[in-house]
Amino acid sequence: MSQRLRPPAPGRRAFLGLAAAGAAMTLGAAGFSRLAGAATGRVLASTAPLPPAPFAVPLPIPPTARPARTEDGADVYELEQREGQARILPGLTTTVWGYDGIFPGPTITARSGRRTKVRVHNNLTVPTVTHLHGGITPPDSDGYPTDLLLPTRCAPGQSRPHAGDAHGGQTTVAYRTYDYPVPQQAATLWYHDHRMDHSAPQVWRGLAGFFLITDDEEDRLPLPRGDRDIPLMLCDRSFNEDGSFRYPDHAHDTFPDGVLGDVQLVNGAPWPLLEVSGCRYRLRLLNGSNARRYQLRLDVEGGGRGRFVHIGSDGGLLPAPQHLDAIDLAPGERFDVIVDFADHPVGSRITLRNTAGQGPMRDVMRFDVVRAARDSTRVPARLSNRFEALTPTEGMPVRTFDFRRTSSGDDQQMWTINGKPFHPDTVLACPRLGSVERWRFSSDFHHPVHVHLAQFQVIARGGHPADAMDAGWKDTVDVRPYEVVEALVRFTGYKGRYMLHCHNLEHEDMAMMGTFQVT
Ligand code: C2O
Ligand code: CU
């Protein structure tokens, strides 16, 4: 699989020092506190008229994909990346780049231990890469950013399809089959585009969907299921006058900190409404935004708060549930929670609020309790017996990954890990398969750090024990400004080439990525 790769063009990755200096000053002025509500990017204002009022459209639920066939005991899915038309803003049509032409893409439901194959056809006009975020996946199927699936169609005005970026060695294939053995426990995962230098605009245009894993242990729990088990993809977008997605042409010059939209979407609908029965629901919260962070809480109209019961992290069920009044959700992270709407009388209106947002972006969606209901579900005191808490040991390999902006000379700056921008030929670490390592992530800004393949447990944050919100197996952790997060990372599954990176997608496209090789 190895290809000789030419170094990426530096122009795409560097950004002007001036803008960076401005951002650094903002951080400095706010001090070294947790900067809970600090901006993590800049708002790109829509030029389209925005919906006059929130909570006017019903929450859509992405359709569940059906396997096209079963092959040697594997469920095989066919997904076509293509343009589709969506009605997102009132009276306007938005062209999305979607898996099967929809945004979010179809939800894939996989079974732990049962092989799932996803054959992706690229009928867009740009190369793509698909990554299963949170998956324990063989390296060839992990969506390394240069493992392109080239398009078979020509862009308007071109006489031949896109031949790939300057990485060499690609041939056009009609499809690419991603092989997911799914060796892991029940969890909420997602898939999205991961093309080098272009993930941010391609995800912004719609290339993302849910991938849910179920297993026997979870099946035995009396948790809400069916239409009371609801995936919620939270993301922000901006729109042009004609309804098309608005994204800057040169984000690295103008939006080096990240692009924030001014329309809050949940499952692709702006500020939607869900009518619920007075009973428990399982909500699978995913932050699918490029750069926006959420601090979520439930505000009851007329006063009072709703409660979250946290049952699962990125990697699956927690050993035991915990109550949370608020949830910090950084790009790429997932929180599985139970909300009991029986706590509120019929007629209650409960707004999911983002206290880190401003103006209309403080609202996410609303739940209206419209009927009473019988409820036979429970949240048991014990959720998963598979969870094993890791502890640091003497002699465990320790590595530091420092996420920060670095000058590349000439008043140019770059987002770097340990002072270096991503280069496909550079390997930052070679952990051994089966081992546990102690990784320290440090940062100068908010950087949601995501590790492919290996899940981890956060043991310390800013010199203190981990927060309640850091509980469980994680694959993404928000490293806050001037903070050090320590995690115990377990390398299971496969040997090969994987990566870690910042999941602020603009930072990722500006080369805040690194490769590790499991040996
Ligand atoms: Cu969700 Cu490497 O990404
Ligand atoms: Cu970052």
Image (cartoon, rainbow, N blue to C red):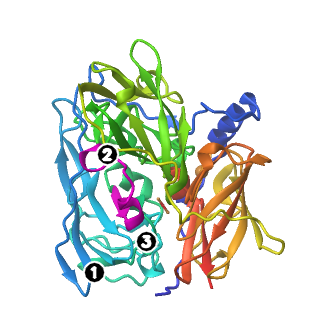
CB of residue at label 1: within 8 Å of ligand 1?
A: no
Query: Please, what is the three-letter code of the amino acid marked with disc 2?
Result: Ile
Please say whether residue 29 is one of the residues in the magenta stretch: no
Where does the image place residue 225, in percent across and percent down from the top left?
A: 30, 50
Where does the image place residue 262, in percent across and percent down from the top left?
A: 40, 31
Q: Is residue 203 left or right of residue 390?
A: left
Mark 2 and mark 1 in contact? Answer it, CB < 8 Å.
Answer: no
Q: Quadrant of residue 157?
A: bottom left
User: To which residue does mark 2 refer?
Assistant: 230
Disc sitting over residue 143 in the figure: 3
Query: Please, what is the three-letter code of the amino acid marked with disc 1?
Result: Ala
Residue density around tag 2, few if under 14, some if 14–19, many if 20 or more, within 10 Å: some
Q: Is residue 80 visible?
A: yes
Whichever of labels 2 and 1 marks the residue nearer the N terminus, that label is 1
200 relative to 426, above or below: above
Q: Which residues are magenta?
A: 209-228
Q: Secondary structure at mark 1?
A: strand
User: To which residue does mark 1 refer?
Assistant: 74
Q: Disc 2 versus disc 3: distance between alpha carbons?
A: 27 Å
Looking at the picture, tell me which residue is in the foreground, 14 or 448. 448
Q: Disc 2 versus disc 1: distance between alpha carbons?
A: 26 Å
Whichever of labels 2 and 3 marks the residue nearer the N terminus, that label is 3
Q: Is residue 335 left or right of residue 74?
A: right
CB of residue at label 3: within 8 Å of ligand 1?
A: yes
